[in-house]
Amino acid sequence: MADVKPLKALHYDLAKVDGLAAVASPPYDVIDAAERARLLGRSPYNAVAIDLPVPFDPDDPASRPVGDPYEDAARRIDAWRAEGVLEADAEDAVWALSQEYTAPDGARHSRHGVLVRVRVEDYETGTVRPHERTHPGPLQDRLELTRATRLNLSPIFSLSTEDPWPLVEPALAAEPWGEVTDEDGTVNRVWRVADPAVVAAVVERLADAQLLIADGHHRYETARAYRDEIGGEGPQNYTLMALTGLDDPGLTVFPTHRLLSGFSHDPARRERLLAGLEELFEVAEVPRDQLDPATAEGVGVFGLFDAAEGTARRLRLRDTAELDRRLAGKPEAYRRLDSAILETLVLTGLAGMSEEDITERRGLEYAKSVPDAVEMVENGIYDLAFILRPVPIEQVRAVAATDANMPPKSTYFFPKVMTGLVFNPVG
């Protein structure tokens, strides 16, 4: 059972910062130095000042600034509280979030969720689960920031098998507490819902939920490490999450495409790969504008763009015999995932990549759009692009019901949940 609670949030006094648009920021892991400077130019109180104290690479000691950026973030928070820029709620509330957005495919959607505290569980309990394997992330950076600030600054985006939105929607005021439009044009609206009856209903509804981490696996790993480090019972046992129901009509999932390198200077390796593809897949050359297999039906259908020939091809798995042999013991829902098929038959099979190669992205990169993937191949940065279809929500749910986790970057959830909406005290 999920242990979900409301929160006594620390949040901005919007009257003192010229509204939420001035202080909200994208998640720290998509911000570069130029973007950070632009956000701080919008307001010195922008959340990026504390969520990304300085733009350095935590894996490169030489890039560390003089002084302690984490303690600097903590001092800023204390100063902002003293100025009244940040204020702490005295009563529990859940925070409702709507996001009106244009998806990468051009369609308009409205996604809904709630911001709450969720008890940090080990994955083995099955209550909170990763939905895919993750690449190593900056755990130490996030852990040091949590130690210094004693806050969850950025929410983890998770999917819930129980949908809380129908319970909070009737309680929403006509005007939101805050509103901000992000760089992708997504209109984010936030409401504070403190009605005890509504809060209790949300907590009760979510008690039966299984939660799947969609975005923020590294933040969840940080929450687990911080919980274990502090020990005992207390606020450190909970972390900030934005929960969206798997049944929410505005929930969309997009693919992440695979880019391979290391073939242009090794013609023999390239020929072995292409010959192997001919054996395992039906291969047909298609016009460039049909490279994307998004609407194709069947098991194991991909687009392939080849730098050497500048050609677009459609791949369709001939049969599942070899796939089922290699993935014996894995649930059927996993064996029918395009990302699992590509990883098993092509990446670790024909291309000879190891699991460590995939984890460390050696000879492998990702693209979130077909044009980006094609451009990087045409520019010679990568040699081959494999174009994937979106994973249907039903398939996400089916895999989640098993003990298997999808391969890395199987899904791309859009839009992101912004930082700065609320902060959650953990100490």
Image: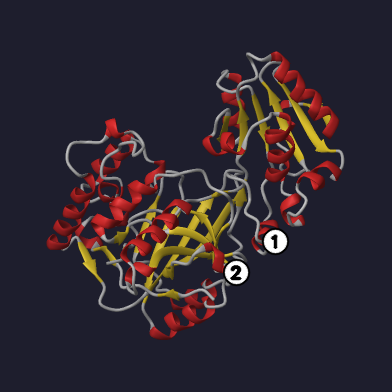
Mark 2 crowdedness (10 Å alpha carbons): few <14, some 14-19, many ≥20:
some
Residue 377 in percent (x, y) is at 60, 23
Residue type pointed to by label 1: Ala
Element type at mark 1:
helix
Q: Is residue 281 visible?
A: no
Q: Where, quadrant-wise, is the N terminus in this rendering?
A: bottom right
Q: 109 or 71, which is in the foreground?
A: 71
Q: Residue at x 34, y 72 (%)?
A: 232
Mark 1 crowdedness (10 Å alpha carbons): few <14, some 14-19, many ≥20:
some
- The answer to whether residue 273 is left or right of residue 81 is right
Residue type pointed to by label 2: Thr
Q: Which residue is mark 1?
A: 398
Which circle marks residue 232 in the picture? none
Q: Residue at x 30, y 38 (%)?
A: 55
Q: Which residue is mark 2?
A: 161
- The answer to whether residue 92 is left or right of residue 333 is left
Residue 224 in percent (x, y) is at 41, 60
Q: Where, quadrant-wise, is the C terminus in this rendering?
A: bottom left
Residue lying at the far bottom in this picture: please name it. 197
Q: Mark 1 vs mark 2: which is more N-terminal?
A: 2
